[in-house]
Amino acid sequence: METRVIGRSVPRKEGREKVTGSARYVDDLSFPGMLHGVTVRSPAARGRIRAIHFADGIPWHEFTVVTAKDIPGKNCIALLIEDQPCLAAEFVNHPEEPVVLLAHHDKYLLEEARRAVRIEIESLPAIFSIEDSLACKEIIWGQDNIFKSFCVEKGDVNGAWAAAAFVVEGSYETGAQEQLYIEPQGMISQVSEAEGVTVWGSLQCPHYVHKALMILFGLPRERIRVVQTETGGGFGGKEEYPSMIAAHAALLARKAGRPVKIIYDRAEDMVATTKRHPSRTRHRTAVTPDGKLLAMDIDFTLDGGAYETLSPVVLSRGTIHAAGPYACANVRICSRAVATNAPPHGAFRGFGAPQSVFALERHLDRVAEAVGIAPEELRRRNFIREGQTLAVGQVVKEKVDMNGLMERAFELSGYYAKRRKFAAENAEARGAIRRGIGFASFLHGAGFTGSGEEYLASEVAMEATADGTVHILAGSTEMGQGTNTIFAQIAAEALRLDCGQIRIVQPDTAYVPNSGPTVASRTAMIVGKLVETAAVRLLGTLHASELLRHGYDAEDFSRACSEYVVKHGALKSFVKYEHPRDLHWDDQKYSGDAYGAYAWAAYVAEVSMDTRTAEVRVDDFVAVQEVGKVINPVLAAGQIEGGVAQGIGFALYENVVWQEGRMVNAQMTNYVMPTSVDLPTIRVYFEEIPYGRGPAGAKGIGELPLDGTAPAIANAIAFATGVDVRRVPITAEALLEMLETVHAG
Amino acid sequence: MRAFLPAYEMETPRDLAAALERMAGEPGGWRAFAGGTDLMVLLEAGKLPHKKYLNIWNLEELRGIAVTAEHVTLGALTTYAEVQRHEILAREFPLLCRAAAETGSAATQNRGTLGGNIANASPAADSPPALIVYEAEIEIVSAAGARCVPYASFHTGYKKMNLQAGELIRSIRLARPRSAALKQYFRKVGTRRAQAISKICFAAAGRVEAGRIADVRIALGSVAPTVLRAVRAEELLRGQRPVDAALLLAAQDALGAEIAPIDDMRSTGRYRRHVARNLLAEFLEVLAS
Amino acid sequence: MPAERARKIRVSCVVNGAAVTCETYPLARLLDVLREDLKLTGTKEGCGEGECGACAIEMDGALVNSCLVPALQAEGAKIRTIEGVACGGSLHAVQQAFITHGGAQCGVCTPGMILAAVNLLARHPRPDDAQIRDGLSGNLCRCTGYMKIFESVVAAVRAAETRA
C-alpha cells in the first residue's frame, strides 16, 4: 500500500525546541511562591520506626513537615494493589524508604534540614536474595514472600525425558539495571480548594498518577489533574515511580498552601527509584539426537524488592517469553516474583523478557553444543512457523520466517566467515586478543498481555478547529521515542494532510482521555491504530456533512472545518479500543493468545576480548527485525540503536553493587553506562510484513532490542573464550576468574 | 546539590604573594581552589567539610610551561588540555600526555590541573604514575619561601602528603630525557574507555642497552593507598635480558608482593593483581621490541 | 542555626553576547546561576558530578561542565550556552542536522551534546569518525546509542563543506 507520510523520516515534532534548549522539562518550570521539597528516607532495610528526631540548629518553624499522619486518604501508592505506603508509618521495609517530607523556599537550607532529621529505627532481620526469600528465612511480605506465581503447561513435559537423546540443564542469572534516563525524576504540585490537586512532571503514564492521587487524597476524579511536562527519557523507570513523587509533592503543597517542586538529584534517583528485576532462570531441556526440542522445563524467578508494584506483570511477560520463537510440543514454565528488602524493582524496557530471553538464548547455544551441532542449526530445526503454537498455546497467525531473518543477519555480519576465522585465530593464540561472534533469535509481543488491552479500554479523541488544525488528544506520552511525530504522521496519512497541520495536545488528564500507559511496545500499534481510526471517523463526519468534497486538498479541508464549526459546533471524533474477537486468553490457565502481534528478530554481536585484562569490546552489531511497518525510519532506527546500546550496557557495563539492600555505587562515576567510544556502529535493518490491526500495518518495537542484545554478546564471548557465561553483567573481574578456570580445566 | 552554600567562602587573591600571605595569616584556614573538578564534586555531594577557599585559578605565577635544555617546568595550574597540546610534552613525555588524555572528559580536561590532581591525592589518579616514572620534582611555596620535593616522596600515606598548611604547589619539574632510545608504556584499565576511574594504571619507561635492561622505571596507580613505584620489580629487571620467561615470572611475583590492591565498588584486589602482572608482561614485550 | 553565612557576591560576565551581573554565593554552581538567576534553562543537570556532560557550556572558548564551575570563577568570563548557539533565528548547522538526522530523542543530553559538537568543529572542522566519537565521549546519551548523533555531526560537517 502506497503511503504519503507514513514511511518517511518526518522530522521530530518537538525537534526545534529540543535543539535550541527551549523545551521545558519539569525542573525548568518555576511557579510564584514555589517551595522546594525533599524526602527523608529510612537508613535501615527493615524495622520499626521508634522515633523521628529533628536536631537543633534548624529553624523548623519555617519548614513544612509532612509524615504519614498528614495523608488525607489512604496511605498507599495505588498500582495493582495497595501495599506500598506513600510514607512509612510504623514499619520500613527497604533502605531509602520515604518517611518524612520537608519543604522550604531555600533549597540549600532544605538540604541542611534533611541532614538534621534522624529516623530512629529498631532493626528487624532483613533478606536480600532470591534464595533467602524462597526459603522464607524471614517472611517479609504476605504469607510466603511471593507476590505472584504462574505455571504454564503445554503438552506433557514429564513424559519427554525418557525418550530424550540429550538432556541439558543450566542456571542463568541477570542483575539489576538502572534506567539512567538523563533527566532525573521530578514533580511540581499545587493544591487549592478551587482547583483540587494538580501535578506537573516527568512521567510516562499520567492516568496512573491520577489514579494513585485519587486514592491518596480520597478525592474524586475531577479534583485531580496530572500534566506531563517534556520528559527526558523514561524506559519504564517513569512508569510507576512518578506516582510516589507526585504524592509527596502534593502532600507538601497541600500542607504548605504553596506550590512545591521536588527534583531528585542523580544519587537519590539511583538509590531510591525502581530498577530492572534481578532474575534467576533454570532450564532443563530434552532434545532428540538431531537436536529437535522434545521438552522445555523452565523455572523463572524475579526479585521484586519490598512491595508488589508491577512485579506480577513483569513476571507475566518474562514467563510468556521464556520459551522463545520455537516449536516445542511440551513446555512447562513455572515462575514467581518474590519479595526482598530492597527498594521495589519495576518496569524497564523489556519488562521481564530480557531476563528470560537471556537465559533461553544462552541455554540453546549450550544445548547445540551438547548435541554436537552449530547453534544456528539448532535454531533452524526448531524455529516456529505459521500455524504452530507458542508455549502459551497461541497459534502463530502471522507470516514468520525466523530462519530468513537469521540468515540475513548472518550475511550482513559476515557471521560464517568470521566464525571460521576467529576460531582459527583463537586456536593459534597469537597476541592477546580473542575474538568471537554470536547471535540471539527472539520475539517480543506488542501491547498488554492477554486480556490486558481489553481491560485498559484505551481511548483517543480528535478535534479539528476552525482553522483546520487537527488536535490529537491522547494520554500517550512523548519521552524521546517519537510518539508525537508518529501520531502526527498517522493522522496526516489518514486525513491526507501534512504533519504541520496536526497538533498533539500536551497530555493533561483534564483534557485528554486515558489511552493507557506508554509502555509495553503498545503506543504505535495499539494507540496509533486508535489515532488512525479517530482520523478516519473525523473525516467521515466531514464527508457526511457534505462540506468536504472528495479529492480535497489542505485548503479545502481547512475551509470545511471552519464551516462545520460554524454550522454544527465542535468537530470531534472519539475512539475506544475494541479487542479483536478472534483473540482469546484464559487468565486461569494462563494460555491462549498472549499478544495481538509479535516483532521477530535476529541479532549478531561481534566481540573482542583482551586476555590481559578480560575487557570485552563489542566491535560490530547487526540487528535485523520484522516489525510490520516502519512508520518513521529515522525514529525507528533510533529506537533500535538506543535499545541495543542499553542492551550492551546490560551485558557488559552496568553493575548495581548492593550492600544490605542499598545500591552503593549510586553515582554516574561508579554506575557505568557506555560512552560514545565504548559502542560500535550499530547496524539496523527492518523487514515489513504488515500487521492487519496496526496503523498502516505497524507492530510495536520499543522493547524488542533489549531482549536479544545481551545473549548475542554472551554467546559471542563464549565462542571467543570458551567461557560458559551464565550471568550478566559480564564484568571483566568475573570473566578473568572464569578464564582461569577454563585454562586450568 | 547538597551543600549548604551560605557556609562557604571564596576569595580571589590578586597575586601569588597575596595568596600565600592570606594562607599564612590563618594557618589551615584558607585552602587553594584551582579548577574545581574534584572539589565541586565533593561539594555537590555535601561532602566538603572545609569552608574557606582561595581562588587561585587566575594566578599567572602558577601557569605556563617553561622549557630549558635540561628541564620542562609545568605550572601547577597547567590543565590536562594544555598538557596534551604541548609539542615537547607530546614528544618527550608521552606518558603524561596519555594520562592527561585519559583523565575525565574533554570538558574536565579543560579545567582539571596537575597541581590540583596532585594535591587531591586520589590513589586512582592517572598522572601520578607518569610523574613517578619521569622522576618529577615538586616545587612548593609558602609565605616563608620555597622548597623542592621529589614527587616520589610527596605522598606519605592515603590522602597524606608532604604539604603543610599555608603551602601551595607552584610547579612540577621534569628532567628532559637524555636518551632517544627510551621506550615508554602507559596503560590505564578503567571501567570503560572514556571518562573512567582507573581500576589499575601502569606507567613505565626503560632502555635496552647491549641486550640488557638499563634504567627501568615502573609506577602504578590504584594498587596502593598512594601511587606506587615498583622498586622490587625494577630491581629484578635491571641488568637482565628482557625476553626471559623465568625473569618475567620472578618480576611479576615481586610486583605482586609490593602492591596492595583492594576490593572496592569498581573492582577486586584479585583482578587488579592479576592485571598488574599482565601489564608488566606487556611492558616487557615493548622493551624487547 | 548553621554557622555564619557567607555574603553573596556579585559576578559579572558575558553570556551569549550580553553583559550580565548576578548576586549569588561564591560557590554556587555556574549551572544554577545560568538556570535560576539568568533563567537560561537550556543547560541541564543530569548528574551533578561532571560525568554526563548535560551541563556543558563554552567558557572563554573552552568546553566545560558548568556543574563544576563555581560562580566566583565565572567573573569576567565569556560564556556561551545552547541559547547562544543559534544566530538570531537561524539554527546552527549542527542544530539543523540534529533535527533532520534524529540526533535528539528525549532532548536532555542535547544542549550539552550540541555545545560539545560545536566546540569540536571549531577546533577540528573536518573530524574523522574517531575524532567525533572522542570529542563527544564526555557527553552521555541514554536514548540514541550515539549513532544518529554522529550522523548529525557528519551531516553538519558536510553542510559546512558544501557552503565553503
Image: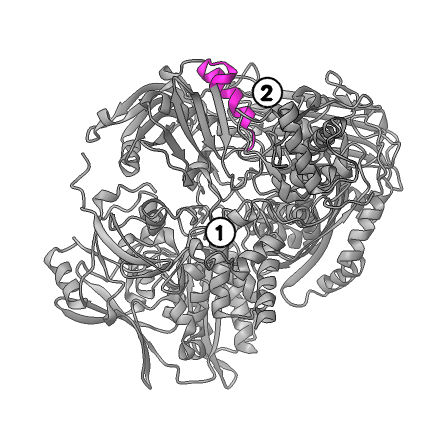
Q: Which mark is residue A357?
A: none
User: Which of labels 2 and 1 is toward the front?
Assistant: 1
Say what secondary structure mark 2 lies in: strand
Q: Amino acid at mark 1?
A: Thr
C118 displayed left or right of A401: left
Q: Is residue A205 magenta?
A: yes
Q: Is residue B161 magenta?
A: no
Which residue is found at the position 59% from the left and 20% from the top? A146
Picture quadrant of residue A577: top right
Which residue is found at the position 51% from the left and 62% from the top? C135
Real-space CA distance between mark 2 and mark 1, rounded to the nearest whole angstrom:
49 Å
Instruction: Give the answer, above or below, for where A291 lies relative to C66.
Output: above
Report if residue A378 is visible in the image. Answer: no
Q: Amino acid at mark 2?
A: Ile
| Residue that carries the numbered disc 1 in the rendered image | A20
Instruction: Give residue A626's position: percent from left, percent from top.
Output: 78, 43
Which residue is found at the position 54% from the left and 49% from the top? A16
| Image quarter (top left, top right, bottom left or bottom right) of the N terminus of chain A | top right
| Residue that carries the numbered disc 2 in the rendered image | A146
- A687 and A561: which one is in front? A561
Q: Main secondary structure of the magenta part?
A: helix
Report if residue A178 is visible in the image. Answer: yes
Tell how many labels: 2
Q: Chain of mark 2?
A: A
The part of the chain drawn in magenta is A204-223
Which residue is found at the position 44% from the left and 13% from the top? A73
| Of pointers 2 and 1, the one earlier in the residue sequence | 1
Say what secondary structure mark 1 lies in: helix
